[in-house]
Image (cartoon, grey):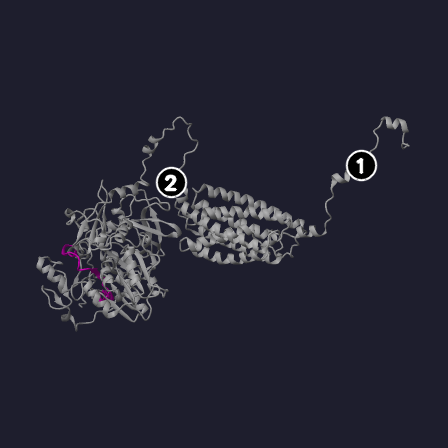
Amino acid sequence: MPSGPPRACCTSTGRSTSHPRRASSTTGPHLRRRCGSSRTVCTPAVCGGATGENHFDMVLLAAGVARIGAVPVMIAPANSLEAVRTMVERAAPRLLITGPGLLSRAAEAGVELADRSVRIVRVGPEGTGAAVPLDELRGGATAPVRLGGDDDLVVATHTSGTTGVPKLVLHTANTAIGRIPPRMERYRLPFLTTRRGDVVAAAVSFAHIRVMAWTASQLKMAPRKLVAVSDPLLANMEKVLEEHRPTSLETFPNVFQHWEQLVDERPELSAQTRLYVSTFDAVHPRTVRKFLNASASRFPTWGWGLGQSEITGIVANLFTRRTVRAGRPEATNLGWPMLVRLNVVDPETGQRQPRGKPGMIIVSTKARCLTYLGEDDRYQAKLNGRWWNSGDLGERVGLGRVRLLDRVVDMIPGISCIELESTLLERLDNASDVTILGVPGQAPVPVLCMRGNGWTRGNGSVPSPGCRNSPSRASSPGKRSRGRPPGRSAGSCCVSGFSARTRRSAAGNGHDPKRLESRCDVNWLPPALVDLPSVASSVSEPRDFRNGWFWAIVVGIALFWFLAYCLAVHRAHVDKRAGIPTVVVAINFSWEFVHSFVIDQGPAQRPANFIWFFFDFIIVYQVMKYGKKDFPKLSERNFRRPFWGICGYCAVQHYLMAYEFRDVLGMYSGVALNVGLSASFIITLRQRRSSAGQSVHIAVCKMLGSFLASLNVFIIFPSRAIVLFWFVVILVLDLTYVRMVFRQIRAEGRSPWVLNRPPVTDPVVHEQATAPAAPDRRRHRALLGALVPPPCAPGSNRERNTGRGRPPP
């Protein structure tokens, strides 16, 4: 490779800015000042590998270019000649390295890829044109090694190009592979990263920024074999899988969807694969399910990540066979932020959207690129301070997750195109691809790509013959595909038979209020005092409250309730009396069972319920051992049967409440149970007439845990009025109980704040054994009146006849 005097060769197209790392000018000197480099940069454009097509040689050539101090510009030769010419002009390179395939295409079309001042080097076999073969440069002087710093400009890669000419994204070593999340692949995480004995295969674009992180991670993890697939077509992929049998396979979602046919015909080729990785775009549940079911591994996993060339990762998730079971079209577009700051804002106003309301996803991350080469104004338009406009439409859901809905430019109000496409793919087994096209003023139009250019009997009603040659997504104006190659299948059918159903789903339940009012005229009645809301608060989405205060409240709830349970268990063991009332234990035990095993909850809430369920076994054991003392008239058998009967009845009740109110968290039944718990403590204290099984510490911890839970609900679910009212009732009952148990322990001659009090004697049993029977006061008065006559009244006849003070004869 020539080592002549380097020169700055990138064009300047923008205005100045005061940002220390993002200057608007993209010339060599400006980039050098921005990145802290003391060397002049030469920008060679690397287009294609040994064949002029997608090949791993591009990565090796880019590494060699960066090693001598130049900046490689990675351009995929699969783009049109006009797009390649435009990107080369933006880069203004001194050297163009390409293969014979691209040169042949340009010669046949009569297009010059670069100016005559740019030297062209051909890599690979003989080809046409005036390009210099790479073999002729062998044996020359060795170029000096000029390695830059981690924050110096190191590479420029292009984006997917679905919005026209691909943008050239400038990255440093830190933003490309040194930051989180691209660095996460270099840690040994169970089920997520490469092992030493793995056979890792990847079919990605080797001109994409993704291949940089993939190469760095695999060289660090050192698997047994690396397989770089340059041709993802079915015929070539079948040979690759048959020869190498990878245990880890990565490609883009649309390529995985294209490989579904190979999984259906030869599932044994994927039997050894335990990990699938798809990046940058949404993936459909049907695709994930087919590949995971074809694997013979005991626990195959699918790692999904949503990202962009400019900021690498956004959200990620891990899918298993259970999470992608049929009937869940939204299962694979949910993820957690990949250690980046993420917000969902209104596209018009920029205000932060509440949980459950769609908005534009913006991201703040240190892995953001420097700028677009030659298009800094376009870069600045997507930047607002430290926040990057991803262009994706999404919404926040529970547990900090984000649901991806669509691209902002493709959005259809009231509909998620990704979920609708997933639903159609679930119902149409013979469909290889589905696209929903939004038409202004009309219902959305689906475009189907069928295998075999036709419909089978199981595909439903056959469309009309006139829609066979409908335009593909590439020719549809205003529609942008999420990374899928246009025109992939020859059989495309336009089906618009679900427009009425779509309109009904967008409007709600489909009822016309005016038509319902016309059926029953009740205007003669007085007006109602309160109007009910149109949407029930029980289905309202939680607010976005994920900060330090949230986690402090959550930790406080768990801590105080744990202490209350432990203290109740300890006190019951000392006093030989149940610390928690029997009926409440049965109701709570059934609640933990339903929300741990019956109802599918979130990945954070369900494990917590599972732990509490097994902790309740200790409480249940103590109730079985000491609970009968509160019911002395019942036998041991008649005590246990009602207990388990209450457990079964309440389990059905809890499930029906969750089903009726769509209360996945069990909030209504759980808070109602807490009201009964607070009341039952007071009743138990009054019934036992002692502090047996109870203490001030239990009362205080229970009160604080309930208070923090009410604060959490008030912040996250402010519209659930009955739940908040119940918490007020709980606080009043808890304060009352704290006062009562404090006074009871003082009346027993003990200190309420002593943790290890001696065992408490049951006063009810003691009074029955030693105290005399209560006298019958009416009989006592009658007997006393018969033995001693009542005194005479002053001035009576009896007193005059007998004399004062003298008894009668």
Q: Are marks 2 and 1 in contact (CB under 8 Å)?
A: no
Residue 724 or residue 74, whichever sits in front: 724
Find the magenta span and give its range: 59-84
Alpha-carbon span between mark 2 and mark 1? 76 Å
Residue 67 drawn at (x, y percent): 24, 67
- Vertical order, 217 against 593 (above or below): below
Quarter location, residue 514: top left
Amino acid bearing label 1 = Gly
Q: Nearer the viewer, residue 414 or 136?
A: 414
Q: How many numbered tags mark residues here?
A: 2
Asked if residue 255 lies in the magenta stretch, the reply is no
Residue 756 at x, y percent in the picture: 62, 57
Mark 1 surroundings within 10 Å by alpha-carbon count, few (fewer than 14), some (14 through 19), many (20 or more): few
| Above or below: residue 227 compared with residue 714 | below
Spot occupied by residue 808 in the image (x, y as percentages of width and height): 89, 32
Report the residue marked by disc 2.
535
Residue 722 screen position, x and y as percent: 47, 41
